[in-house]
Amino acid sequence: MPGDEESMKATEAKPSENLNIVIVGHVDHGKSTLLGRLYADTGSLPDGKLEKVQAICKQQGKEFEYAFLFDAFLEEQEQGITIDTARTFFMWKGRQYIIIDAPGHKEFLKNMISGAARAEAALLLIDALEGVKEQSKKHGYLLSLLGVRQFAVVVNKMDLVGYRQDVFDGIEKEYREFLGQFKAVPSQFIPVSAKLGDNIANRSGQMSWYSGPTVLDTLSAFRKETARAEQPLRLPVQDVYKFDARRIITGRIAAGRLKVGDHLVFSPSNKRANIRTVEAFNIEPQPTEGQAGQSIGVTLDEQIFVERGEIASHQESLPSVSTAFRANLFWLGKRPLEKGRKYLLRVATKEVDCEVASIHRIIDTMDLAQQQGSNSVGKNQVAELTLRTKAPVAFDLSASFEATGRFVLVDEYDIAGGGIITELVHDDQEFLREEARRRDFAWVKGEVTVEDRAQQYGHRAAIVLITGGRHTGKSFLARKLEGRLVADGRHAYLLDGENLRRGLDADLSEEERGQTTEMARRYGEVARLLMDTGLIVVSTTNPFGLAFREASQAIRTLVHPVPVIAVHMSKTAEEPPPNTDVVLAGPTDFDAATARILDELKRRGVLAQAIGAKPVFQYSI
Amino acid sequence: MKHLRQLEDQSVYIFREAYKHFNNLAMLWSMGKDSTVLLWLARKAFFGHVPFPLLHVDTSYKIPSMIEYRDRLAREWGLDLVVGQNKEALAAGMNHTMGRVVCCTALKTNGLKQLLEHKGYTGVILGVRADEEGTRAKERYFSPRDKHGDWDFRDQPPELWDQYKTTFPPGTHIRIHPLLDWTEINIWEYIKLESIPFIDLYLDKGDGTRYRSLGCAPCTTPIKSTAKTVDDIIEELRHTTVAERSGRAQDEGRGMELLRKDGYM
């Protein structure tokens, strides 16, 4: 065997094209052996590697196996299982295969998922003697969930079943049926013996009944993915740089193309601007376009404030925006995923707090049986659930867009789960968000930008929204805060809901005034207009009475993305509305309360730290 | 060329993730081919700027022309260069004859740990590649190290799609590996594509030898080669079956495994 490697080495030069491949399957079904064989049969081993591993085997009194080549750690060899995602390379017919060896042992599912998540194609191994096992099914299902569409099933250890076609056919039938339940279709089933080299590089003389391709032929037939560039544009904003005179919006194009002059819409903020330049270092001439896969930078013709997490697209095809979506998720966390607990959600570059609103069902990957009524998802389980986010998020359904249709959940410090978005959940703010989107798109702008106003005034526009029950001192605090801000030289205005009732809302009937939605909409639009003039609006939700919780959410939606500083007052300790920034419970010291709100305004970057100093942020509506 | 741009796009994405998430970020630069490509990719990611310091752990045993090259590029590219050295160990006479792993641990691993601790860096960017040797094949793009700088390769956090580990408990730090998917050939192809200045120790200057991997003078030996240009190197690498780090003494036996578990780069 080492003999015929020599002849192949001389002819095979190292090529430049790469393809990321993952090899998955049940523990002990022969992944490392297949890898060792692929490496040896393609002549890709560095000199000395084989000898080094053989020497270690001899030292430990073990028979040499191809599998040992890849178990680089001595600890692993002692345990006899692959621990982590090892990456190795081999060359075949003008392409370099980066092999992500994903471990099959149950405890190491997270490593298998890490490996498979970056693979462009997969080989799934099944032991002919053992047949379809738990991990064979789980890995097949996860490949589909992770978006690995190109894969082949390799039925290994055919030598142990006497190279019998009926054994192979039985496994193919059983496994095809399983994959069919979630519409996964492998490109090929290949009968092999990795140990003896049957149907790996060379056709087997033992299985004349099989006329399909070898493992290496199958790998050669896998394609580099290119279709994403033909989709509508998705550019998640990664960061905004201002290292020099250029203000560069950066990101990796997840789908589609862009070029200089394109009109971009950023979601969920609805900001819009045209691409002025495409920036790059050491590329001559300067590029004027970009496409899916590229990490790029663009400058815009207007100094709009956009931040990481927004998704730029063309106006004809906008991503979804909501605070809720339905998803399929796999959980890898040390502790179970629990309904009602807070997690950090990451969709493309957006990071936002979220919680599990409901767990619809747990899916057993062994037989795809479903279990309902659970309040938690255990480690290595897959579930269908609805997530609710603290702030609106732009995303797509994973069936349409891969990169903006998937997400991870972070529990404490670690990524603990991931999933794909299957359905948009319409939240109660949808109507108002649509109104905000239409209004923002058509908004007529003057020559003075909000950036100019902020520089002139020394602060950003914002709204301080004071909520609470009756007779808690909301109006008194609002007046005191307005007075303090103006005395400090800020531009502030007290928007009293009562005044709107008597003026703007005078056309409404008594019944209509009882409808919070329309009242909140009018209130929000007026506040938005005042903030467009650069003011800090101080406001109470008095006109909404006990419906202040509902109203404050509506106002947030309409003024988004202007900062909302939410202050809640109550005589006794009670649960404040979601996202409250300052809680004032019990008897109130109004001077102290005012000072706390000013601190919050500074912390949020609305006010510069010192009076008179110019703020450092860039901001516009 | 397309495959190089794909690698570049991925590395640039990683750089930008690192810069966004770590306030106290630094990058290791050994002046070798890999970390110089890494430095070039930083300039790509940040449009000609390098917005964090470059760290060099100086063992005092480096080949002199490497130091000259370092200082020249730092000047020309306006780099914020921070040089660290385990002066205590050197004062006590540490050198490779006391044992290679002992010497590497003292001058490189501990030199790095001292520097990180002193400056309080929470994110460190390194130019390790998965194809260099076995232990590096196990790495993540964002790889956590505990309070002692140790690496628990058995329990690494998952990396899903383009989502990396960017939060970590106080006292620990993250190592970031933008070059993980690059191969030795890719490095040279990219040096050629972008005309990146590199040290001429990598070329044969007439005596039929060149360095393939650079380290400390006493523990790095040149290989037999007549490659006089980058093209020659690429052609040579396409046909070689000699391991890249065969001239690096520290790789013998279980050297790299022991070193890396303990915090070596």
Image: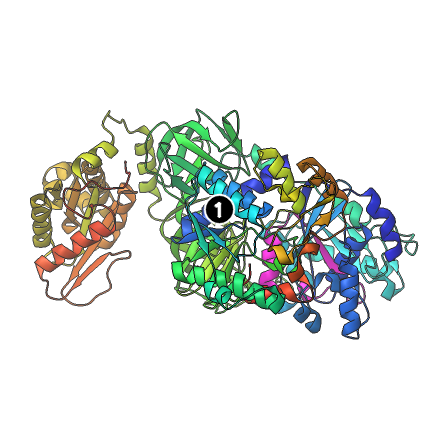
Q: Position of residue A444 (x, y in %)?
A: 27, 26
Residue A113 shows in this picture: yes
Q: Is residue B6 left or right of residue A427?
A: right
Q: Position of residue A475 (x, y in %)?
A: 9, 52
The C terminus of chain A: image quadrant: top left
Residue A521 part of the magenta-drawn span = no
Pointer 1 local density, CA inside 10 Å: few below 14, some 14–19, many at least 20: many
Closer to the camera in the image, A270 or B147: B147
Residue A404 shows in this picture: no
Picture quadrant of residue A111: bottom right
What is the basis of the colouring in this image? rainbow
Closer to the camera in the image, A258 or B89: B89
From the viewer's perspective, is residue A540 above or below residue B98?
A: above
From the viewer's perspective, is residue B124 above or below residue A237?
A: below
Q: Which residue is mark 1?
A: B15
Q: Is residue A337 left or right of residue A443?
A: right
Report in which chain the residue with disc 1 lies: B
Residue A111 part of the magenta-drawn span = yes
Q: Is residue A254 left or right of residue A613?
A: right
Magenta residues, as a range?
A109-135
Q: Position of residue B96 (x, y in %)?
A: 61, 64
The N terminus of chain A: image quadrant: bottom right
Toward the bottom, the furthest residue is: A61
Tell me the residue at 73%/39% (across/down): B235
Picture quadrant of residue A244: top left
Q: Position of residue B167 (x, y in %)?
A: 43, 58
Tally the numbered discs.
1
Kind of residue at badge 1: Phe
Picture quadrant of residue A205: bottom right
